[in-house]
């Protein structure tokens, strides 16, 4: 019967989370006891077999996933329209409220950030019309199409608001700045 | 000139994916199915569903997710939510299957007949397939509380934290359950594993 601590160390080693000190402790135990060595070998072998058996047993089908049949094209279209309307409403309201922002590194001539506009699509700015921003490449592209610019999105979990940064890259180059907020 | 360190933002793509699904976005649903199908299959398998029936149960899980996503109040807890759906769907499936036991038994008899008419596989193939089946059988025989973390760990290589988040368990509990799962499997598979070691030694002696 193996010591519980040794069993735990073997398990941690197989999971790749063994700390240095634990590694030394396990190595010593392996050198001291053939039983520990055999247990380690057996556990490693079983892990390997289990991994292979599970992955073979749960081979992911290569066919494209089917979209659930309840999906309605009309429903989607309505959703897209509401997203576009919400986004445009949000853009208009925040641009009016905040205006253009200017950053002034070291008190030098300001780096005008004409291309930067923070948009809040949360309840405060966009009202109920703006839904939460969804993830995925498809979504980002769809939003980019709506505003006709390249867009970076930053999502605030606390306020559940989305801030969009529109970038017209043709006039931009990266510069180092010191900024305080 | 020094610069301010970059602002780090914890941007939870997965929650947003679920929010998109809740708003009936088909692309988001397809992404969810593609990215997360495997571990959900693992949960279904861990619940005792045979590999051949996984897809049926998984389809049911996706249907429920699609239908109910809008009711999910906290999208950041979606993994636990989907995990519950997978467990419940698997349990429903197994109950229905038990009710159809007679039909299944006759199907198994037909299948056994089919198998006997096939050409005999090589000894090595038999060994490998026996070993494979023995391991799956041993995993299935684990208590569910040990089986789930073991399957997620070995199927997805998830960390203890990820497993805990999905199954709603503290990290220490995940680790303890993995230790115990391994202990039980070692006990149950000792003969198979030592048999493999003996074959390996024989092969190296011959070469």
Image (cartoon, rainbow, N blue to C red):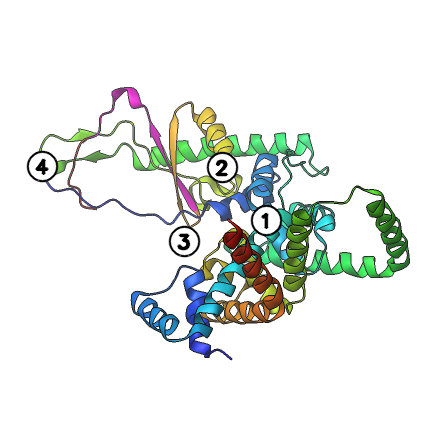
Residue situated in front as seen by the camera: A30 or A114: A30
Query: Would residue A6 appear left or right of A109 to someone viewing this image?
Result: right
Q: Residues within 10 Å of mark 1 (few under 14, many from 20)?
A: some
> Which residue sits at x=36%, y=71%?
A31
Image coordinates of residue B170 in percent, x first then y, are: 48, 69
> Which residue sits at x=25%, y=24%?
A172
Answer whether labels 2 and 1 touch (C-beta < 8 Å).
no
Q: Which residues are magenta?
A: A161-174
Q: Is residue A26 magenta?
A: no
What residue did someone put label 2 on?
Answer: A136
Q: Nearer the viewer, mark 3 or mark 1?
A: 1
What residue did someone put label 1 on?
Answer: A55
Q: What number is the disc on residue A158?
A: 3
Q: Residue furthest top?
A: A170
Labels 3 and 4: the sequence-earlier one: 4
Image coordinates of residue B20 in percent, x first then y, are: 55, 41
Q: Chain of mark 1?
A: A
Q: Chain of mark 2?
A: A
Please state, as top left, top right, bottom left or bottom right, where the N terminus of chain B lies in the image.
top left
Q: CA distance from mark 2 to mark 4?
A: 40 Å
What residue did someone put label 4 on?
Answer: A107
Image coordinates of residue A15 in percent, x first then y, are: 44, 60
Q: CA distance from mark 2 to mark 1?
A: 26 Å
């Amino acid at each position: 019967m193996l010591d519980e601590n040794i069993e735990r160390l073997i398990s941690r080693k197989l999971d790749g989370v063994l700390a240095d000190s634990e590694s030394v402790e396990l190595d010593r135990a392996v050198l001291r006891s053939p039983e520990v060595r055999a247990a380690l070998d057996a556990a490693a072998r079983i892990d390997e077999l289990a991994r292979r058996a599970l992955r073979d047993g749960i081979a992911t089908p290569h066919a494209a996933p089917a979209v659930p049949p309840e999906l309605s094209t009309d429903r989607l279209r309505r959703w897209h329209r509401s997203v576009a309307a919400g986004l445009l409403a949000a853009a208009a309201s925040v641009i009016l409220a905040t205006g253009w922002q200017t950053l002034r590194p070291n008190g030098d001539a300001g780096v005008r950030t004409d291309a930067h506009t923070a948009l809040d699509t949360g309840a405060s700015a966009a009202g109920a019309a703006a839904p939460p921003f969804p993830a995925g490449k498809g979504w980002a592209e769809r939003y980019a199409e709506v505003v006709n610019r390249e867009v970076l999105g930053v999502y605030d979990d606390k306020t559940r608001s989305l801030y969009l940064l529109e970038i017209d890259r043709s006039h931009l180059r990266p510069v180092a700045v010191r900024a305080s907020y | 000139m020094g610069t301010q360190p970059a602002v780090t933002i914890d941007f939870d793509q997965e929650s947003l994916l679920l929010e998109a699904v809740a708003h009936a976005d088909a692309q988001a649903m397809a992404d969810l199915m593609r990215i997360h199908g495997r571990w959900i299959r693992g949960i279904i398998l861990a619940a005792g569903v045979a590999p051949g029936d996984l897809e049926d149960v998984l389809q049911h899980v996706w249907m429920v997710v699609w239908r109910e996503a809008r009711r999910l109040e906290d999208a950041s807890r979606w993994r636990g939510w989907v995990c519950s759906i997978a467990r419940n769907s698997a349990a429903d499936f197994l109950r229905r299957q038990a009710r159809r036991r007679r039909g299944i038994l006759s199907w198994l008899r037909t299948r056994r007949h089919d198998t006997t008419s096939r050409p005999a596989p090589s000894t090595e193939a038999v060994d490998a397939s026996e070993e494979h089946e023995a391991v799956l059988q041993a995993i299935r025989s684990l208590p569910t509380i040990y089986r789930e973390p073991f399957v997620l760990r070995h199927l997805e290589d998830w960390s203890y934290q990820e497993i805990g988040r999905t199954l709603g368990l503290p990290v220490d509990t995940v680790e303890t359950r993995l230790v115990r799962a391994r202990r039980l499997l070692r006990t149950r598979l000792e003969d198979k594993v030592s048999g493999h070691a003996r074959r390996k030694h024989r092969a190296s002696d011959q070469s």
